[in-house]
Amino acid sequence: MADFIQLLVAGLATGGIYALVAIGFTLLWQTSQTINFAQGEFVMLPAFFILIAMGAGVPFWAAVAIGIVISAIVLGVLFKRLLVDPMIRHGVLPLAIATMALALFLKEAVKDFYGAEAQPFPPLAADMNVSFLGATVSLQSLIVLAIAFGAVVALQLFLNRTRAGRMMQATAQNPTVARILGIPVDRMILIAFVINAVLAALASALVTPIYLAKFSNGEYLGIAAFIAAIVGGFNQVRGAIVGGLLLGVIDNFAAAYLSAQYRAAIPLLLLIVVIIFRPQGLLGRVEERTV
Amino acid sequence: MAVLEVRDLSKQFGGIHAVEGVSFDVNEGEILGIIGPNGSGKSTLFNCILGQLQPSAGEVRLDGRAVTGMRPCDLNRLGVSRTFQLLQVFPELTVRENLILAAQEHKGSMLSRLFGARDVGLTGDANRMIEFFRLSHLADAKAGGLSYGQQKLLDAAMAFMAGPRLVLLDEPAGGVNLTMLASLRDRLEAINREGATFVVIEHNMEFVMSLCSRIVVLAEGRIIAEGKPETVRQDPKVIEAYLGH
Amino acid sequence: MNRRVVGIVAGLIIVAGLIAAPFGLKPYGIYILTLWAVTTIAAIGLNLTLGYAGQISLAQGAFVGIGAYAATLLTTHGWPLGSAYVVAAAACFAIGWLLGYPALRVQHHYLAFVTLAFATLAYLVFRNEEWLTGGIYGISNIPRPSLFGYLLRAPRGFYYFCLANLAVVSFAAWWLIRSPWGRAFVALRENPLRALSLGVDTRRYTLMAFALGAGLGGISGVLYAPLVQYIDPTPFSLLLSLNLLLMVIVGGSGYFFGPFVGAIVAVLLPEWLQAASKYYLFYYAAFVMLLLIVSPSGIIGFFERRFTAARKIESPASATEVKVA
């Protein structure tokens, strides 16, 4: 039982990180039909912003703040203005392919101009264990869980309790109608991109201590975000949260009980099962039938 | 036996009865007009007859054969076609190619069409249609380059090419200037003289009254009047339905 | 000067260049050129599915893999390569039909999901079914084919063989597009509702395009196996499917020469850049991004817009606007 709780907490912590990444991914899709294949790299990159800031002598927490701000500008505003805006009128696919190229661009940029070696990254909490519900869990897991949970709650409060947030939800559900209602749709979309960048930067600070800062981190995280979004339901933010948590927990249990080869297959099998039996995702809405 | 028989056709969307108990015939060689105020269910009726929507109740027969709810492409193969309110020619294809496309799916099988002639033997028919609708000088032009009125003619031509048995025209006069309108009416009358049977939904009263041999009036999903144009025009129920809106 | 004449002359020069090329290249250069030819076949298949029928397939890489493993298993057991063509094309065509038939009845982009699931499944099978595929250890010593008794082992001989394959596939694709089917594809891509009302069985044509595209993927794989002569699951992941998508989009989706140009960008360009700089992937990625920003309809789309005033019509799969009929 103690093992179970330990795995569950660790799984939820990882899942929380996946959820952060998947939420942003879903928001981009909902508001602007952007499939961001560079989402994983968006989580890989901020860690390097933070390391560079720390290298310049800035203390850790200030560096994290700087990293988040730079991410919001570069991966939010610049991404939208330079890459998405020129292409959005031409459909889903060209933009999706462009984000594929962006992923490679960011990955290679870090590898070529920072370094190919994995860099250590400071954890958010001391490396110690605490007693929780009768089991021993790492403090790091609990802190990650708390921060991820906090971020999600903050986002939900924003979306449901503030005027801007409700306008954003309207934009996400139906941009055309939102425009007619006088909602500044383009600004809402920009906000969505900034939120995505901030969540990704936060996820970066939470996940990089585990995997170390390396240019190739984006690969796995991108796939995880994608699977979490699809499993949870591509047209709902709540779905992304559920998908992320579920994926984190399942993945963690699989790692503990299965061999490495089978463990890697589990998220993929989950994806296959969801697509076949519930293609709209666990929380998603069914869309119209074709003729 | 009529070409088309519609019996007790109904369509509900949730609690809304868009079409309710509609029955009428379309006889060989006639031009039937369907009119009614906005929201009376004309387009829904068309869509139900043509298989774009599944009727909630009722029956549609083509030459005595039950075709209720058949897929549009299958119905088309039996000789029924339509135009849409929003103009829908294929801009990238030439005028002639549009017409060949309109009829090619009736000829032979899919496989024979892959290995047979490029024009599926339809160049003659297409040319005849082009001449009939007076588009000869534009035969090899891309349809996207035609004027709105010319595209409307092409649209109608495609429908007749595709539906030798019965054509349903959805607001063919919409957005067309007076000169073109006269030309369109002239061509439709001419093709009717050749034996084509068709049904027209229209808002343009003058157009419908002068073109159609018989009129059906729809209001709130039901037929409220039927008969010759002069009779219908003076029917108090019809006047009320229109004035009431 | 007549555009048609210019086109034909340019075409002849290019074909002559392709035939002469191996004489000026080292074996590695010939290998890369052969890889381009083989990849183009898969891209032509995907262009059929995506560019002409408007359906997103994420499984083209899996079909290439099926073709490659079919060829590997057959030729390492003494069967001629010809048998692999039949098996791979038939299997991929059938799978395409089986996947597409139910998928196309449901919501519009469901096929994309189904192909994603299938690609994932195929990769798992390639990796885990060691008894069949050799798993992660792969299968090596794949023989090159022989034609009329001549063994095509040398790079140049095998290159011409692949080039000939590409020529045949190109001709078949050209025939398809020029036929009444091509007209039906234009119709179903531009306006499926209208096409349906004109008797075009949009579902069947889409299914055909997808199944044929899958079959071409399989054939590409059949040539890939003897090219690299060692097969393991790594090349056939989702990455290959995404890369093929990139080729079709960058080349120009729905244009006949799009796949050829797209394959040049994805296969040849990184090689050329690698000779110039060790940061070649960085420059490659930047190039692709800039290209798409400047011309989302790809390279051929860019030239078409330059030389014609006519508007290009986007395929339904790439359009964000919802058409209200």
Image (cartoon, coloured by chain):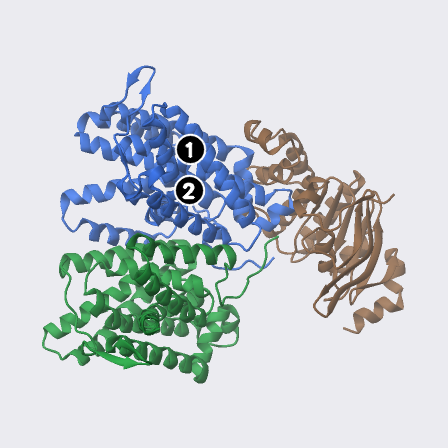
Chain colours: A green, B brown, C blue
Can you say whether C107 is above or below C81 in the image?
A: below
Q: Which residue type carries mark 2? A: Leu
Packing grade of label 2 (10 A; few <14, some 14-19, many >=20) is many
Pick the front one: A232 or C286: A232
Indicate the position of residue A127 as horizontal and vertical percent values: 18, 76
Indicate the position of residue A198 as horizontal and vertical percent values: 30, 74
Disc on the earlier residue, 2 or 1: 2
| Secondary structure at numbered mark 2 | helix
Q: Which corner quadrant of the image does residue C271 belong to?
A: top left
Q: Is residue A280 left or right of residue C240?
A: right
Q: Chain under label 2?
A: C
Packing grade of label 1 (10 A; few <14, some 14-19, many >=20) is many
Q: Which residue is mark 1?
A: C88
Q: Chain under label 1?
A: C
Residue C173 visible within the image:
no
| Secondary structure at numbered mark 1 | helix
Q: Which residue is mark 2?
A: C46
Q: Is residue B234 left or right of residue A98?
A: right
Q: Is residue A173 left or right of residue A145?
A: right
Pick the front one: C48 or C301: C48
Q: Which residue type carries mark 1? A: Ala
Pick the front one: A170 or C174: A170
Instruction: Specify the quadrant that holds the C terminus of chain B.
Output: bottom right
Can you say whether B119 is above or below A104 in the image?
A: above
Q: Which corner quadrant of the image does residue B125 belong to?
A: top right
Instruction: Tell me the distance, in whole angstroms, between the alpha carbons under discs 2 and 1.
Output: 16 Å
Task: Report the residue that reaches farthest toward the front.
Answer: A1
Instruction: Please report contact status of discs 2 and 1: CB closer than 8 Å, yes or no.
Output: no
Checking the image for residue B148, the label placed there is none
